[in-house]
Image (tube, helix red, strand yellow):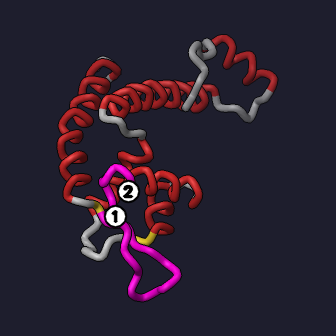
Amino acid sequence: MFFLKELPTRQVLERYHAAFPAMQVETIDRALRMLRTASLLLRELEAYFATHQLSQARFLVLVVLDREEDPGGLRISEVAERIDVARPVMTRTLQSLAAGGLVRFREDETDARSRRVLLTAKGKRRLHDMLPGYYATIDAFMKAHDAPD
């Protein structure tokens, strides 16, 4: 999340450039605007997820499992890697999804120390019920924030 509400003006960026000549004003300006826009979109998506009693992490786990073609599911470490969170965070996220009946675990036949995660029918329904609203939220946001031609 990017928390800077009021971005620096062009004049402020030029002042920084004078003090730090390696700084590219255009690049920094574009990057700050991109961060601000992405942050606003993330806030809208988090609000949408909350209406479905999910977080972004939980939603992304459902997406990652839904798109997986291996019917045997994924190892917890593979899910964590694809979502780029620490394993303890992933473990807690998966436990909460399992408690809600959205995912299930099974033993890994190739590694007795590992478990695999699978999307349940309930999890797939929940995700597929959410996707139209998810896409609509992104579409509306982009229409409202696209730069005019």
**Residue 41 on image: x %, y %:** 40, 28
Q: What range of the chain is rendered magenta?
A: 98-118
Residue 98's disc is 2
Contact (CB < 8 A) between labels 1 and 2?
Answer: yes
Residue with the mark numbered 1: 104
42 versus 106 height, above or below: above
In 3D space, how far apart are the residues under numbered discs 1 and 2 (Cα atoms)?
A: 6 Å
User: Is residue 111 on the magenta stretch?
Assistant: yes
Q: Nearer the viewer, residue 137 or 17?
A: 137
Among the two numbered marks 1 and 2 on one chain, the one whose residue lies closer to the N terminus: 2
Q: Secondary structure at mark 1?
A: strand
Quarter of the picture holding the N terminus = top right
Query: Compared with residue 121, is residue 42 higher up or lower down, i.e. above or below?
Result: above
Q: Residues within 10 Å of mark 2 (few under 14, many from 20)?
A: some
Residue at left 47%, top 67%? 76
Q: Amino acid at mark 2?
A: Ala
Residue lying at the far right in this picture: please name it.
19
- Quarter of the figure with residue 51: top left
